[in-house]
Image (tube, grey):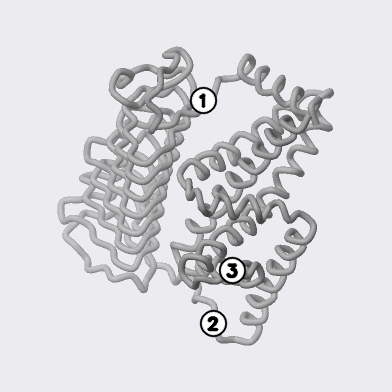
Amino acid sequence: MKNLKKVLLLLIVSCSLLFSNVYTVNAEVESKVDDTNYLNIENENSNKVVNHSLFTAGDDISVDSNIRGINFAAGNTLDVKGSSEYGLIAGNKIKFKGLVTRDLFLAGNTIEVSETANIARDVYIAGNNITVNANITGNLFLAGNKVVINSKNITGNVKVAATTLEIADDSEINGTLLYNQDATYQASKAVINKVKTYQQRKEKDYTSSKTIASILMGIVTSFLISLMLYYVLPGIFIQLDRAAEESKLLNTMRTGFIYLLAVPVISLVSMATIIGLPLGIVLLFFYVVTIYLSRLISAIYFGKLMAKRVFHLDNVYLEILIGVISIKVISMIPYIGPIYLFVMIILGLGLMYNMYKKLRIKTRQTK
């Protein structure tokens, strides 16, 4: 394991020398940082040029730098300005005011693209309440509950999947507006080149015996695998008990988010060399396994929280059952389900990484 860790460390260092460096920034840390390698998004480093892609994670985030790469950001409230080549932003409340020279991807609850925003190509947005005020040069793809388009001009096509669609009277769409026919939309005075509707696939009937059997099978399978983990690796449940008491969700999710993005990059870079090919394949396989287990770990974690704090129970079987059923039910909710699963994955990855780190520290202390 020591040799493996050294090889991984060498691969990370080599990546930083051969490719554009990617760094991780904690928006809540106030310690000093190296201006050449990191971006401190407090006050002193605003409007700086960042010659690499950038990861930013925290609670209240403000990004106002010129990023010559991909702008990754995740948090509760995000105020995104500055510029980047691509934008991948996820959070609860997002306000985008910046410049993107290529494509922009946004996912969250309340999302607003300000009229000062400038996106050179396509925009992809998924959320609950979406408001687009900026002019769009390329195509616009929107999926949400309520979608409001106030753009003065949209050059490309607009595709919408929504419950309610509103378009300002002074808007102009040069391409085709395509929206689901069951959406609530009253034709405005907007100038639209062509309007089409499409029929969404009908929601699955969860009362059917086949679907219910599939759901129950998934719950039973997850429950049995979790029980196997309990009997084979009981230490996992002890660590999850401690994690539930600490409740450091934000830091854990940030760690999981970094793991989710960094491991496949390291794996692909190692597979590009003859020497690193076997290691890259093993690392990629390990990555897939941890992605699958992350949902179970998160389910057990939340099962423990709910069992002890809501139901006041202290039974490992009920904790597992509550967690597995909760994650299965919530994942089936439209719009919320995919976002919830993503959160469960990064949370589970963060929990597993923290458990591994604590195990390494304990192993060193015993030597």
Residues at marks 3 and 1 touching, judged by CB atoms closer than 8 Å: no
User: What label does residue 278 carry, if any?
Assistant: none
* Residue highlighted by disc 2: 205
Question: Measuring 30% from the left and 18% from the top, which residue is drawn there?
Answer: 44
Q: Where is residue 206 drawn, in percent x and y?
A: 55, 81
- Local packing at callout 2 (Cα closer than 10 Å; few below 14, some 14-19, many 20+) is few
Under mark 2, the amino acid is: Asp
Instruction: Classify residue 19 as left or right of residue 157.
Output: right
Residues at marks 2 and 1 touching, judged by CB atoms closer than 8 Å: no
Q: Image quadrant of residue 130?
A: bottom left
Q: With respect to residue 286, does 203 lie above or below?
A: below
Instruction: Classify residue 317 as left or right of residue 167.
Output: right
Q: Quadrant of the C terminus?
A: top right
Residue projecting furthest to the front: 366
Under mark 1, the amino acid is: Tyr
Under mark 3, the amino acid is: Asp
Residues at marks 3 and 2 touching, judged by CB atoms closer than 8 Å: no
Give the mark, 3 or 2, whose residue is nearer the N terminus.
2
User: What label does residue 23 carry, if any?
Assistant: 1
- Looking at the rendered structure, the secondary structure element under dot 3 is loop
Pick the residue in front: 342 or 318: 318
Camera sees residue 103: no
Pick the residue in front: 356 or 103: 356
Q: Where is residue 320 drawn, in percent x and y?
A: 63, 67
Pick the residue in front: 158 or 316: 316
Which numbered mark, 3 or 2, is in the foreground of this view?
Answer: 3
Question: Measuring 61% from the left and 57% from the top, which residue is drawn there?
Answer: 295
Q: Where is residue 77 drawn, in percent x and y?
A: 32, 44
- Looking at the rendered structure, the secondary structure element under dot 1 is strand
* Residue highlighted by disc 3: 314
